[in-house]
Image (tube, helix red, strand yellow):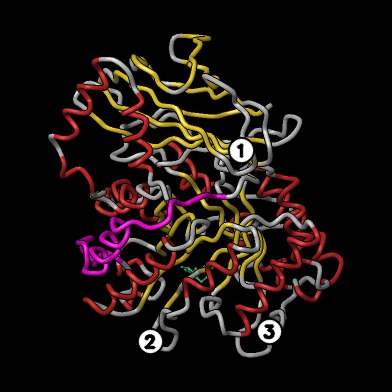
């Protein structure tokens, strides 16, 4: 297992010249840097994101927003991108609340999980009363309309939410959407893929955490069927709403691992756990440990910031109290992230799009900024940026190129922002189309088999601008 930190070390040791020696000396003098001091930084140690749900009203509360900006690098709109919010009248989309959240996220270097394109709940009134073929058409128009509008801005979409029944039946939930035919789920996924080929497409549900539960098995069987028939699904979201009647199961890592083995990413998408003190903390730790034990568990999102903002506030289920103070659960979560685990290896079907340059300097940037270009011949590649060492005047970055399918070579483009300058590189050959754009090519042979990685590094003299570079790659 190679952690990002180890990769940085390896890159640094491969560097030549006095700069590398100076870097090594400085880093050794600051050993305390090992642990991430925020959730997003600690998750980044294993190439994972850490996110939160965010309601539009958070934007009016600077205390909450400071926490969001500091701790999280993935944002889910709590309600603002649901069907009723997005299309209040048939054919009339209302993007305003969704845009406020998506724009804030992108302007602050965060990525966005889209939630949710098709769901039996929180439908607009006009849709609730529909059925049959006309509802199927309306649902597909909604999926296409929303996914097209946000195309290129969404890391992962919850394409279908909560389509299975609770209890022991393993059946689909009865709903107006289910009434349009059993194939409504795959129809939604196909429409979403056509509308935004760059977003990961997830099925999202709750009570799917315990491997032995019928609902878990039913969703598993659907995903296995979709993968075998080529229905475009990239990820499964586990909402992870826990309370005393539905505790964190001891076999959670088994559940996540078995889904991942089907060839999908798994994500914890709406985590909240009733309780307080150390016992609540221990349960958060269990979730983090389960995710970190599965390489395709690529990130965790909690369902809100402060207990008082939670949809079930009386359960005090979040990581911050009503005054935005860190709870014991926060410390357990941070420590579990810092304890490390597998390095996350997301699948290659799709990836997040580059975010706009932040208008303000974010306190932390996302660790991963992959892009997946259209196929060029055989496979494609994904470029992921990882933060390296930092000094007063400069910082190191490492780009990992991952092959999705076999590729014979790759090129990777790194864009820095004025007044930044790249002053050193290693492990690849640079060319300079313009002052702030560097194109890297393999120093030797660039062939990579499916799943293999290569990495290169560079040093940026930042001139006061700490914005992370944008990275992308294309395969041939
Ligand atoms: C919840 C929101 O948090 C509430 O504000 C809203 O009133 C109801 O929905 N599963 C989901 C989420 O997928 O969208 C739900 O969010 C919580 C359960």
In reply to whether residue 275 is colored magenta, the answer given is no
Task: Describe the element under mark 1 as helix, strand or loop.
Answer: strand
Q: State which region is magenta.
A: 319-346
Residue 54 visible in the snapshot: no
The mark nearer the N terminus, 1 or 2, is 2
Residue at the image position 74 percent from the left and 59 percent from the top? 188
Give the number of the disc on residue 170: 3
Asked whether the residues under the numbered discs 1 and 3 touch, taking CB atoms below 8 Å apart as contact, a structural biologist would say: no
Pointer 2 or 3: first along the chain = 3
Q: Is residue 124 visible in this depiction of the protein?
A: yes
Q: Which mark is residue 403?
A: 1
Q: Is residue 207 left or right of residue 188?
A: left
**Residue 407 falls in image quadrant:** top right
- Local secondary structure at mark 3: loop
Secondary structure mostly taken by the magenta-highlighted segment of the chain: loop
* Circle on res. 441: none
Query: Percent x, y for residue 56?
Result: 43, 54
Question: In this picture, is 250 found above or below 331?
Answer: below
Q: Secondary structure at mark 2?
A: loop
Q: Gap between marks 1 and 3, in whole Å?
A: 37 Å
For the residues labelled 2 and 3, the Cα–Cα distance comes to 23 Å
Are the residues flagged by discs 2 and 3 in contact, CB closer than 8 Å? no
State yes or no: discs 1 and 2 in contact (Cβ < 8 Å): no
Residue 167 locus on image (x, y percent): 61, 89
Q: Is residue 72 above or below residue 257?
A: above
Return the residue at label 2. 244
Picture residue at 55% right of the left edge, 47% below the top: 155
Asked whether 470 or 286 is in front, the reply is 286
Nearest-to-viewer mark from 1 and 2: 1
């Amino acid at each position: 297992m190679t952690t990002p930190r180890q990769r940085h070390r390896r890159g640094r040791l491969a560097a030549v010249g006095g700069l590398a020696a100076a870097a090594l000396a400085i880093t050794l003098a600051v050993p305390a840097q090992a642990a991430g001091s925020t959730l997003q930084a600690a998750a980044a140690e294993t190439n994972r994101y850490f996110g939160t749900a965010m309601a539009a009203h958070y934007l009016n509360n600077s205390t909450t927003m400071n926490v969001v900006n500091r701790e999280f690098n993935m944002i889910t709109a709590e309600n603002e991108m649901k069907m009723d919010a997005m299309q209040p009248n048939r054919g009339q989309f209302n993007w305003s609340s969704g845009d406020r959240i998506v724009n804030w996220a992108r302007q602050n270097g965060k990525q966005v999980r889209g939630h949710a394109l098709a769901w039996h709940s929180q439908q607009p009134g006009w849709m609730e009363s529909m059925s049959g073929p006309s509802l199927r058409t309306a649902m597909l128009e909604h999926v296409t309309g929303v996914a097209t509008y946000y195309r290129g801005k969404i890391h992962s979409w919850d394409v279908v939410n909560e389509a299975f029944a609770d209890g022991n039946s393993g059946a689909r939930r009865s709903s107006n959407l289910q009434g349009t035919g059993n194939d409504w789920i795959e129809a939604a996924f196909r429409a979403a893929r056509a509308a935004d080929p760059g977003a990961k497409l997830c099925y999202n549900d709750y009570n799917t955490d315990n491997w032995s539960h019928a609902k878990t098995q039913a969703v598993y069987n659907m995903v296995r069927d979709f993968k075998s028939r080529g229905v475009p699904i990239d990820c499964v979201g586990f909402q992870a709403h826990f309370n005393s009647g539905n505790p964190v199961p001891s076999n959670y890592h088994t559940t996540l691992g078995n889904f991942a083995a089907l060839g999908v990413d798994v994500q914890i998408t709406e985590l909240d756990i009733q309780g307080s003190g150390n016992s609540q903390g221990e349960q958060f730790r269990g979730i983090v440990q389960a995710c970190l034990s599965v390489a395709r568990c690529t990130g965790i999102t909690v369902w809100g910031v402060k207990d008082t903002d939670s949809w079930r506030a009386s359960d005090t289920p979040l990581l911050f109290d009503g005054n935005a103070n860190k709870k014991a659960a926060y410390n357990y979560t941070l420590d579990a992230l810092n304890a490390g685990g597998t390095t996350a290896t997301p699948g290659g079907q799709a990836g997040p799009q580059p975010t706009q340059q932040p208008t303000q300097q974010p306190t932390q940037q996302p660790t991963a900024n992959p892009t997946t270009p259209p196929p060029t011949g055989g496979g494609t590649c994904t470029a992921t940026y990882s933060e390296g060492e930092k000094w007063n005047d400069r910082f190191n970055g490492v780009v990992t190129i991952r092959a999705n399918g076999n590729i014979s070579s790759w090129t990777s483009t790194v864009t820095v922002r004025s007044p930044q300058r790249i002053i050193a590189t290693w492990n690849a050959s640079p060319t300079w189309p313009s002052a702030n754009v560097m194109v890297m090519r393999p120093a030797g042979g660039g062939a990579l088999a499916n799943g293999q990685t290569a990495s290169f590094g560079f040093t940026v003299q930042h001139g006061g601008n700490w914005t992370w570079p944008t990275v992308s790659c294309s395969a041939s």
